[in-house]
Image: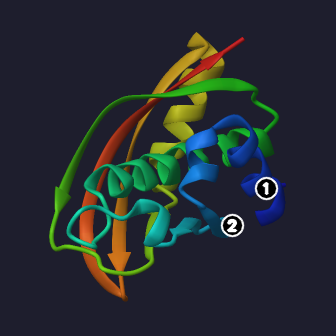
């Protein structure tokens, strides 16, 4: 069973302090994916828009959280790190912003889990969309590595 929103948010704030500084809120944790939200003010830049690093950080966190929550649900304790990522900034964001990481296809997830169980190490590529005011403002792809033990 997936952890609930409060559990995931508490874990992020305790174990990834940047998420607390950014005032990240977990909005969705379910079989469809993960949605994280953050306000403008703690993430503002000199142009009164969201700092690009905050956009990237929220996207990275969304993918990381999807892997973490789903491995926790399977009782597969693992260290999760990002190996590489790419982000395209489509437009500035001048308000609160959200990162949405949909659950990957069943085939992709099952291959990730099988490799993790067999080799104690596995990689998965995830896509995350970032929105500001309901408009897509960023497109992110990240490769996450899970290490058992």
Image height of 129 relative to 120, above or below = below
Query: Which residue lies at the image location 58% right of the left edge and 51% below the top edge?
Result: 21
> Would residue 135 appear left or right of 120 to someone viewing this image?
left
Residue 13 vs residue 67, the one in the foreground: 13
Horizontal and vertical percent for residue 102? 48, 64
Quadrant containing the C terminus is top right
Query: Which residue lies at the image location 50% right of the left edge and 35% below the top edge?
Result: 111
Determine which of the numbered discs, if any, sits on residue 20 in the image. none
Q: How many marks?
A: 2
Q: Are marks 1 and 2 in contact (CB under 8 Å)?
A: yes
Horizontal and vertical percent for residue 143? 36, 35
Badge 2 crowding class, 10 Å Cα cut-off, few under 14, some 14 to 19, many 20 or more, is some
Quadrant containing the N terminus is bottom right
Horizontal and vertical percent for residue 146? 56, 25
Q: Quadrant of residue 138?
A: bottom left
Residue at the far front in the pictured view: 46
From the image, tell me which residue sits under label 1. 2
Label 1 sits on a secondary structure element that is loop
Query: Which residue lies at the image location 42% right of the left edge and 61% below the top edge?
Result: 43
Which comes before the other along the chain, label 1 or label 2?
1
Q: Quadrant of residue 16?
A: top right
Residue 142 vs residue 123, the one in the foreground: 142
Determine which of the numbered discs, if any, sits on residue 30 in the image. 2
> Would residue 131 appear left or right of 96 to someone viewing this image?
left
Query: Which residue lies at the image location 30% right of the left edge and 80% below the top edge?
Result: 94
Image height of 142 relative to 133, above or below = above
Label 2 sits on a secondary structure element that is strand
Horizontal and vertical percent for residue 46? 23, 63
Residue 4, can we see it?
no
Image height of 87 relative to 47, above or below = above
Badge 1 crowding class, 10 Å Cα cut-off, few under 14, some 14 to 19, many 20 or more, is some
Q: Quadrant of residue 144?
A: top left
């Amino acid at each position: 069973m997936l952890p609930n929103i409060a559990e995931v948010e508490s874990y992020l704030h305790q174990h990834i302090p940047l998420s607390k500084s950014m005032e990240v809120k977990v909005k969705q944790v379910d079989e469809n994916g993960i949605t994280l939200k953050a306000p403008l003010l703690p993430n503002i830049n000199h142009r009164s828009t969201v700092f690009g690093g905050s956009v990237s950080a929220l996207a990275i966190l969304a993918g990381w959280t999807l892997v973490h929550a789903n491995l926790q649900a399977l009782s597969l304790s693992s260290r999760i790190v990002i190996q590489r990522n790419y982000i395209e900034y489509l437009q500035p964001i001048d308000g609160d912003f959200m990162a949405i990481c949909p659950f990957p296809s069943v085939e992709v997830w099952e291959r990730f889990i099988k490799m993790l169980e067999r080799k104690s190490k596995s990689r998965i590529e995830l896509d995350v969309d970032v929105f500001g005011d309901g408009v897509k403002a960023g497109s992110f792809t990240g490769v996450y590595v899970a290490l058992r033990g």
